[in-house]
Amino acid sequence: MIHLFKQKPILCDLIPNNHIDIHSHLLPGIDDGATSLENSISLINQMNEIGFKNIITTPHIIESVWNNSESSITEKHQEISNAVQEKCEIASFNVAVEYMMDDSFVKRLGTEKLLTIKDNYILVEMSYLSPPIQLYDIIFEIQLAGYKPILAHPERYQFYHENFKEYSKLKKAGCLFQLNLLSTVDYYGKNVRLVTEKLLTNDYFDFVGSDIHHQNHVNAFKNKVKLKSLPQLEKAIHNNLFFLK
C-alpha cells in the first residue's frame, strides 16, 4: 500500500548524536529546574541518551524571584561538576544564564561580566505577561555592551501571536531566536506550535534548546513532531554546532 503522507518523526529521533544544548535548568535547587543533585544527574543521563552529549545549562536570574548572581551560579556549577563527570557520560557540562530583561538586568549590564553561552552570546527572556516597556532600548544596550542577544522561546510569548510583525522587528533589532524543541510537539499548546510553524517557515529560528526543567520535559521528547516545516527545524538544530568548543 502506498502511503500518501510520511509519518511524523519522534522528536528525540531528530536530535543528532553529540548535539549541544544551550538552554536547560539542571543546577539543583537554584531555580525552578532540578531539585537535587540526584535529580540533576538523572536528567543529564536521560538527555545523554537522547543525544545531548554537550550541555550548557542556563539557570534563571530574575529579580525577586530567582535572585541568583553570576558568582552564585558559577559556584553551584563547580560544586556539582565533579559528580556530573563521575556519574554522567556526557562530553561537556558548562554553565551560562537565562537573563530576564528587566530593570535589574539593565543595571547588571554595566556592572557585571555576564555569563555567556559562547564568546559574547547571551540568552535572554522576557515576561510571559508583556514585553518590557523599553524592550528595544534594552536590546540596543545589550549590543552596546558588546553582547549578542539570543531570545529564548519567542514562540511562547502569546502577546506576539496576533502581532507577528513584532517578530520581524525583533530580528531587525539584532535578536537571534532560540526555539524550544518541545514547542514542536504541542507541549505548550496548539497555538504555540502554530506560531512555531510560522516562524520556522519564515526561517526566523537561529538555534534550538531543550529548556528541560524536570522529568515531564524529558518524557515529552518521545512525542511526535507536529510540524510540516521539518527542513527548517533540522537546520536550526544543526546550527547549534556553532556552540561546540
Image (spheres, grey):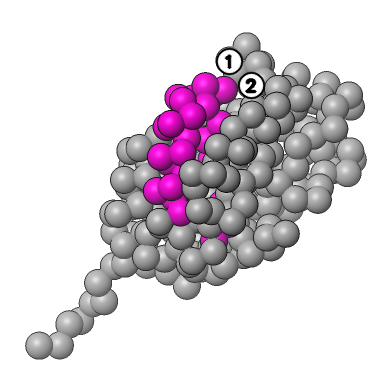
Which residue is painted at 37% across and 45% down in the image? 218
Confirm or deny contact between disc 1 and disc 2 (CB under 8 A): yes
Mark 2, secondary structure of its residue: loop
Crowd band around label 2 with a 10 angstrom C-alpha radius: few (<14), some (14–19), many (20+)? many
Q: In the drawing, does residue 232 fall left or right of residue 148?
A: left
Assess whether residue 34 is covered by the magenta stretch. yes
| Residue at the far top in the pictured view | 64
Q: Quadrant of the N terminus?
A: bottom left
Any part of residue 100 in sight: no
Residue type (three-letter) at the residue carrying disc 1? Val
Q: Position of residue 91 (x, y in %)?
A: 59, 56
Rendered image: mark on residue 65: 1
Mark 1, secondary structure of its residue: loop
Q: In the drawing, does residue 133 fall left or right of residue 238?
A: right
* Number of marks in picture: 2
Residue corresponding to mark 2: 62
Which residue is painted at 41% across and 65% down in the image? 14
Residue type (three-letter) at the residue carrying disc 2? Ile
Q: Quadrant of the C terminus?
A: bottom right
Q: Position of residue 116 (x, y in %)?
A: 75, 42
